[in-house]
Amino acid sequence: MIVVRAPLRISFVGGGTDLPDFYRRSPGRVISTAIDKFVYVVINRTPLIDKVSARYSIAETVNHPSELKHTRIKAALLDLGIHKNIEIASFGTLPAKTGLGSSSSFSVALMRGLHGFLGRKIDKRQTAEAASRLEIELVGEPIGKQDQYAASFGGFNVLQFNPDESVDVDPVLLHYKTQLGLEDHLLLFFTGITRNASEVLAEQKTNIGKKVDTLKEMAESVHEFKEKLLNGNFRGMAEMLHARWLKKKTLASNVSNSTIDELYEAGISSGAWGGKVLGAGGDGCIMFIAPPEKKNDIRHALKKIVSEKKIADFQEIPVKFVQAGAEILYNGDYVHNFG
């Protein structure tokens, strides 16, 4: 049995510039961090059961991976030539579709684990590249590469996406007091509203030709954000997030909606310096950077709206930053070749 985990992530600025339709014209750039919320994948060899099983929100047992409904598991098994005698299960700290990159974290953990299943060791970069290839090329998702690299490498990083398809990973080495300070100024809420990120990203992809200048500005802003972060200028960071969130809303009509806008404005009106909706937009999590003494005011303001709109799954998510990326927690497997 192999147990793998990969962290979720918070992306601060530069989101959307990791899409190939943009970075093939001009380098994309994102600054993000891994957080202490994880996706776990368990892979079990079943030598006496000549089947393929996948257990996630539903359970599937089939004779061949081509029969699976789970697109990522099916594509990964077919590509790696694993056709039988395997059981795969996944678990998450948080629900899916939160805007924290859980789908790519799953892909990262899956590819790391499957290579281990085959007796292969792959490093962080190879894991990120394998997960990116799985999602973008094999499954055909209209997404970028930032989530796969964030989950695989862990920690705070500036990720640069180059026209030749290479990705530069530049670690941001924070003083521990700065990290603790940012955690103390950060609020993260799951709105309870979910949607498929691919729907939002598909429209963004279509609009890239008309939004190149905006995306270039967003990519360039990563350098300024990094400097503010290293200097512990949390208010400056928040104001940048606010400005970039307003720009991101122009990239596609479905990046936001009236409920998201109302929740966001309530946070700003209650004392937050700035914030953004995480992920592709339109759903998932809202993040604020705010003075610690204003946190309760922000909580109360958002909960009032949630109560009025009867949003059942709204909740605050406590967050810490983590250095660890995808890792195999346990490998009690043995190596054998399966057809």
Image (spheres, rainbow, N blue to C red):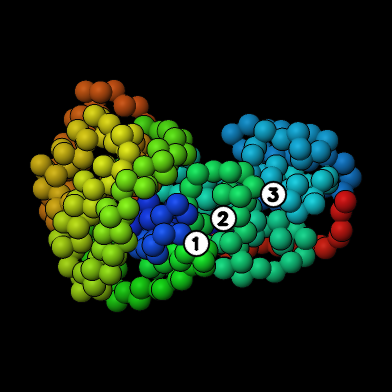
Question: Which residue is located at x 79 percent, y 34 percent?
Answer: 62
The amino acid type found where label 3 is placed reads Ala
Name the residue tied to disc 3.
76
Residue 60 located left or right of residue 33:
right
Could you tell me if residue 202 is visible in this image? yes
Residue 97 in the image: x percent, y percent?
A: 45, 39
Name the residue tied to disc 1.
149
Mark 1 burial class by Cα count in 10 Å: few <14, some 14-19, many 20+: many
Task: Decide which of 226, 313 is in the foreground and name it.
Answer: 226
Quick check: 148 above or below 194?
below
Task: Give the mark count.
Answer: 3
Question: Which residue is located at x 70 percent, y 69 percent?
Answer: 121
Residue 187 in the image: x percent, y percent?
A: 26, 50
Task: Decide which of 81, 178 is in the foreground and name it.
Answer: 81
Question: Which residue is located at x 36 percent, y 32 percent?
Answer: 193
Q: Which image quarter: residue 156?
A: bottom left
The amino acid type found where label 2 is placed reads Ser
Mark 2 burial class by Cα count in 10 Å: few <14, some 14-19, many 20+: many
Dot in front, 2 or 1: 2
2 or 1: tag closer to the N-terminus: 2
Question: Which residue is located at x 32 percent, y 53 percent?
Answer: 212
Name the residue tied to disc 2.
132
Residues marked 2 and 1 touching at CB (< 8 Å): yes
Give the SS element for disc 1: helix
The amino acid type found where label 1 is placed reads Tyr
Residue 315 located left or right of residue 45:
left
Residue 303 in the image: x percent, y percent?
A: 22, 33
Give the SS element for disc 2: helix
Quick check: 189 above or below 152?
above
Residue 250 in the image: x percent, y percent?
A: 26, 42
How far is the residue under mark 3 from the one under mark 1?
18 Å
